[in-house]
Image (tube, rainbow, N blue to C red):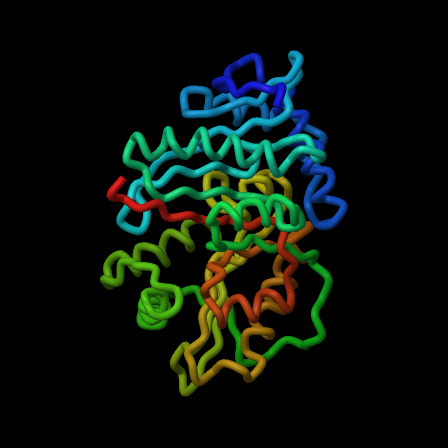
Amino acid sequence: MTYKLVPFTQEHLQPAVELFTQRYRAEQADSPCLPSRVLDDPDWIKAALRTKLDNPGVAVIEQGQLLAYMVTSAQFSKKGQQAAFVQEYCHSAIPNRKQELYQRMYQSLAQEWVNKHIHLHLIGHFAHDALLQETLYQIGFGALVTERLRDCSAIDVGPDQTIKQEQDVSKLLDLHLEHIHYYPGSPIFTARSADRHSALADLESHAQNGDVFFVTYERDEPCAYLIVGESAIGAEGFLLQETNTAQVKSAYARTGMRGKGIGKALLWHAIEWSKNRGYERLFVEHETANLTGSAFWSRYFAPYLYFSMRYVDNRL
């Protein structure tokens, strides 16, 4: 082993962006819906990475060349523990030594995180990087969240006249609360706030942001909905920001309404809405443990990004 691990600093920014850009280009070949902003505007990634310089990070150097890097994006509380997150643009490595380099980088950063009592580790990585996915799996990471993309071509269903664009979000409150209560159940086990005030505030926030609510009713009661809007800066889909991308921001159907084509009809409306407003693509993010949601989204969207997670014994 002739390389050395050093702290990630300003001098590593440009070669790090070049490494990440190479990996992005490879993923774009497998995920053609990915936009080209990363390739056309590398200073965007460089500026984003510069904001992480004060966070724990490591660079792998050999004969003055950067072979790999990994930088902590953020530290926060998740699932009752302190978490460290490495965003998708905050790591990369040369292809022919990827497995060993990632092992060494994670070993170094993980110790630093645990020394700070951070026991939940998360990494975002491209869906078609099979070697990296296997490397993370062998270290102890498992799937948590997927981001998926599709173009705005039509799916084979016509508009369902029972679906309407709802303007009064208060009519969706009970259904939205039911959706919130869905996530603590097995096998998702994700805690979410379920009081009426916060649920209504969430719906109103979507409306204020210009998001659109497509809803289907049964006996004049809403039984399924889909919220679509422009991909927002600072939320999911970092690599899709300012790329003319729409997002499915929330969707839910009551148990008795599933398997009847309602989800497909709602998605048809979301795609048509996106296409008619000139969006080039549509994306959705979902928990991999959401078995019902995963089965639906995987039929119409292709994955381009995974977020994997590892728990470390918090007695350490």
Q: Is residue 114 above or below residue 221?
A: above
Left or right: 157 in relation to 6: right
> Percent position (x, y) of residue 313?
31, 46
Q: Is residue 308 above or below residue 70?
A: below
Q: Quadrant of residue 38?
A: top right
Instruction: Say which quadrant the N terminus sits in.
Output: top right
Q: Nearer the viewer, residue 162 or 237?
A: 237
> Percent position (x, y) of residue 129?
65, 46
> Percent position (x, y) of residue 264?
60, 74
Left or right: 171 in relation to 94: left
Q: Residue at x 27, y 58 (%)?
A: 193
Q: Nearer the viewer, residue 118 or 105?
A: 105
Q: Residue furthest right?
A: 29
Q: Residue furthest front?
A: 1
Q: Residue at x 63, y 54 (%)?
A: 149
Q: Nearer the viewer, residue 111 or 70?
A: 111
Q: Is residue 107 above or below residue 272?
A: above
Q: Residue at x 66, y 52 (%)?
A: 281
Residue 171 in view of the camera: no
Q: Quadrant of residue 316?
A: top left
Task: Give the total of numbered labels.
Answer: 0
Residue 64 in view of the camera: yes
> Percent position (x, y) of residue 17?
63, 25
Left or right: 11 in relation to 302: left
